[in-house]
Amino acid sequence: MAAGLTHSTDLSPVDGIRLAGCSAGIYGAARDDLALFEICDGARVSAVFTRNRFCAAPVTVARKHLQHGPVKYLLVNAGNANAGTGAQGVNDATQVCEALAGLAGCAAEAVLPFSTGVIGEYLPVDKICRALPELLDRLADDAWPDCARAIMTTDTRLKGSTATGVGPEAFAVTGIAKGAGMIKPDMATMLAFIATDANVSQGALDRILKTAVDESFNRICVDGDTSTNDACVLVATGKNNAGRMVGEAGPAYDRLEALITELCTRLAQEIVRDGEGATKFVTVRVDNARSETECTAVADALATSPLVKTALYASDPNWGRILAAIGRSKGVDLDIDRISVHLNEVCIVENGARAKDYTEERGIAAMQDDEIEIRIDLNQGTASACYWTCDLSHDYVTINAEYRS
């Protein structure tokens, strides 16, 4: 029921990256569930991870390995989260890294593991290890779609995007992501793997990733839950203009940051469009706040409200629910009498009360659209920000009630 989501398998290779996907048999049904990224020598890697205190074992291991030195491989499995598995989970994730390192001739610390799927089940180490030779044999520079499929769980569409910058560098960027449930900002709330051929300093790469995540993956919500396994990885291979380093300031930095942020925003919106059971894609725009923090606090209150989300599903312009959500925004000093609210082009609230020319018929008409913008004007500053969410349907309950069956 993806809300206006289309997918493209036309994902351009990034010089310095080879990939592969295959089936390790983690799922009962025959489907790819294991992905491998091989990164060229000299590349730089940046990553951000979930802040959930019950973080999964692969997150623990990946964080540790990332601090050790150069990264050569990203190994991702679907169907099992390896979360809530204690010391054995860490040992299992480490064992998989060691097995790949032994086959590939690199240090185990050069492998970053990632997992997604059911929480509380031990990782099927033997199945994954048996599939590693096939993965290595399949490595190719054009296998981005294969990897995008292999990391899916309840996703109904693969999620990927490609962009090429303008200017003397013409940076290439390609990325894939997975996610349809347990989606709420607190880092990235999904898995995403992005690569560019730019030659970027480590400091610049870290800054670009933080900005891109903050303005994309940290502004989406499906259901208000944050996963134990979230991670977003950005790789810069340095194959484009290898002699011209992109530092932490300047026109080249600005172009690359904008390119990667735009790509991450597209991936983030694809996650929302593919939200479990979603039928509507909703943009929450907050204008004229005192700060961007105020904007996101107000937007988050709306995007996480089950009452607002179920009203969206029912095409019910119950604007009282919207006002109530705005009013409980955390850390925002609101002047209620200044606030106006629009559903698409229909003004439903003006100066904190029902708009004089609002009618239920106009509200219902606006709510029928598959794509809806809720625009909130706080009229107390100059900051603006957008946030993306979806409705909450019967199918969301069904999908999650039957998730392990």
Image (tube, rainbow, N blue to C red):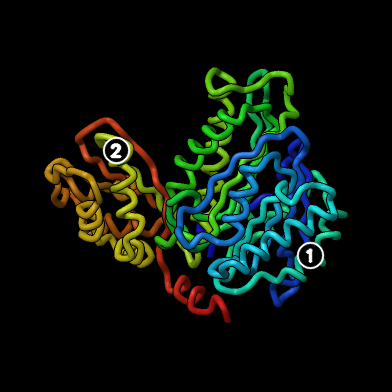
* Front residue of this view, candidates 396 and 125: 125
Percent across and percent down for residue 254 are 53, 24
Quarter of the image where one finds residue 146: bottom right
Residue 9 at least partly seen: no
Instruction: Name the residue at the bottom extreme.
Output: 405
Between marks 1 and 2 in the image, the one whose residue lies nearer the viewer: 1
Q: Residue at x 55, y 30 (%)?
A: 257
Quarter of the image where one finds residue 366: bottom left
Task: Give the alpha-carbon distance from disc 1 to disc 2, as whole Å.
Answer: 51 Å
Q: Which residue position holds label 1?
A: 129
The C terminus lies in which quarter of the figure?
A: bottom right
Q: Residue 372 shows which numbered tag?
A: none
Q: Residue at x 26, y 37 (%)?
A: 289
Judge from the rendering whether residue 17 lies leftward or rightward of residue 380; answer left or right: right
* Front residue of this view, candidates 336 and 293: 293
Residue type pointed to by label 1: Cys
Q: Residue at x 53, y 79 (%)?
A: 402
Q: Which residue position holds label 2?
A: 287
Percent across and percent down for residue 361 are 26, 59
Percent across and percent down for residue 391 are 40, 62
Judge from the rendering whether residue 340 lies leftward or rightward of residue 17; answer left or right: left
Judge from the rendering whether residue 10 lies leftward or rightward of residue 90; answer left or right: right
Residue 26 at least partly seen: yes
- In the image, residue 23 sits, relative to residue 264, either above or below, namely below
Q: Residue at x 51, y 42 (%)?
A: 265
* Numbered disc 2: secondary structure: strand
* Numbered disc 1: secondary structure: helix
Q: How many marks?
A: 2
- In the image, residue 299 sits, relative to residue 76, either above or below, namely above
Contact, CB < 8 Å: mark 1 with mark 2? no
Classify mark 2: residues with Cα within 10 Å, few (<14), some (14-19) or many (20+).
many
